[in-house]
Amino acid sequence: MRYYEINILDSKNQVIRRYSSLRNGVYNPGCLMVEFDIPRFGESTPAGEAHLTIWGIGPQEMQQARQDLHGKKIQIVAGMSPGLPLAGKWNRKLAIEGTIFQVFGNWQGTDLRLDFIIVSGPINDSDPQRLAPIQLTFPWRAGTALSVALTQCLMNLGGGYRPNISVSDRLVLNYDWPMFCGSIKDLAQKIKSFSLSCIRDPGYSGVEMAVVNGNEIRVWDNDYANHVDKASKASASARVKNPIQIEFVDLVGQPTWINFGVVSLICVMRADIQTGDHILMPKRARPMIQASSYSHYRDDSAFTGEFIVRSVRLLGNSRQPNAESWITIIEAGVRKPVGGK
């Protein structure tokens, strides 16, 4: 069955509100209807905030939420729970952990709902009225590798965020470059632009940054041969060696090309795939070049091989009955070797 759990926490990380589709481990048919749109993206190309709507709350709760929940931390866990033949296969995972930037209620007829706008990643909480992005100082000294300079910069963020940096050791400056960035987005855009100008090998994708798993700031590129953290289980090299297998029964419809070298696929709701992960298309699949009218060709995927996830979007409506209402949309690029043609 469709599973969700929404936790709202105070400044001491104590849960003050909880909404869940399960009660005592059993699906609750009377649970509130929720809708959400949660994007996951590289910070160099941001895709906006996450949106959440909770239907069926009471008038008192709606009024209190509008007054008390601004600036609070929120966690959304999504996936599937046992109940249907294809359900319960994937563990329920954290879909997003962020800060409530705005909350407002709506009362239309007999329907009451709460709408949330959620911002993920580090923000400056010293001014609770603004919740502005945190500013970063990035003093990159001559002769220092980018991985070292970034580690020193991100360790000063605070807020419990931990860096996970897997970039090429060829990214070294021969001059001082002190940078002052107004947000993680600004830092990511500047570093990606520099990395592409520094390493001009064919197939090199540049350095990308993303906030994953709630409090992890993932920084990576695809120059795996020159990574210094190959032994780490959380590194980009480890993700290359252990790609996530996409099964044919995971797919909702066929994958399709949306750009040169970029494929889009829709899966049943799963929150375990992050930006920067590697995925494998269904096994024993062959390209579908036969006419679609032949039914014995419809159990194969139109794509094979390994892809690198560029962005993920989680879309859910817990009550809508069709399959497209509880999905994960993945955009992934073809894996290319650096220096290859």
Image (cartoon, helix red, strand yellow):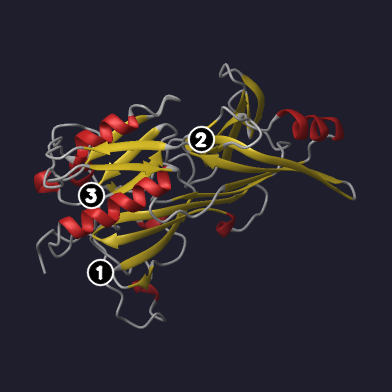
- Would you say 216 lies left or right of 261 here? right
Looking at the rendered structure, the secondary structure element under dot 1 is loop
Name the residue: 9% across, 62% down: 339
Find out whether the residues at labels 2 and 3 contact each other: C-beta distance under 8 Å. Answer: no
Measured from the top left, where is residue 165 in percent x and y? 25, 37
Q: CA distance from mark 2 to mark 3?
A: 25 Å
Quadrant (top left/top right/bottom left/bottom right) for the C terminus: bottom left
Looking at the rendered structure, the secondary structure element under dot 2 is strand
Above or below: residue 325 compared with residue 217: below
Residue topped by disc 3? 221
Disc 2 versus disc 3: nearer the observer: 2
**Identity, as a three-letter code, of the amino acid under mark 3:** Asp
Q: CA distance from mark 3 to mark 1?
A: 29 Å
Residue 300 visible within the image: no
Task: Give whichever of 155, 212 is nearer the camera.
Answer: 155
Q: Which of the two labelled residues, at mark 3 and mark 1, occupies the earlier sequence position?
A: 3
Name the residue: 61% across, 33% down: 6
Find out whether the residues at labels 1 and 2 contact each other: C-beta distance under 8 Å. Answer: no
Find out whether the residues at labels 3 and 1 contact each other: C-beta distance under 8 Å. Answer: no
- Would you say 18 lies left or right of 114 here? left
Mark 2 surroundings: few (<14), some (14-19) or many (≥20) residues within 10 A? some
Residue topped by disc 1? 286
Looking at the rendered structure, the secondary structure element under dot 3 is loop
Residue topped by disc 2? 123
Name the residue: 40% across, 43% down: 181
Measured from the top left, where is residue 241 in percent x and y? 17, 44
Name the residue: 31% across, 73% down: 260
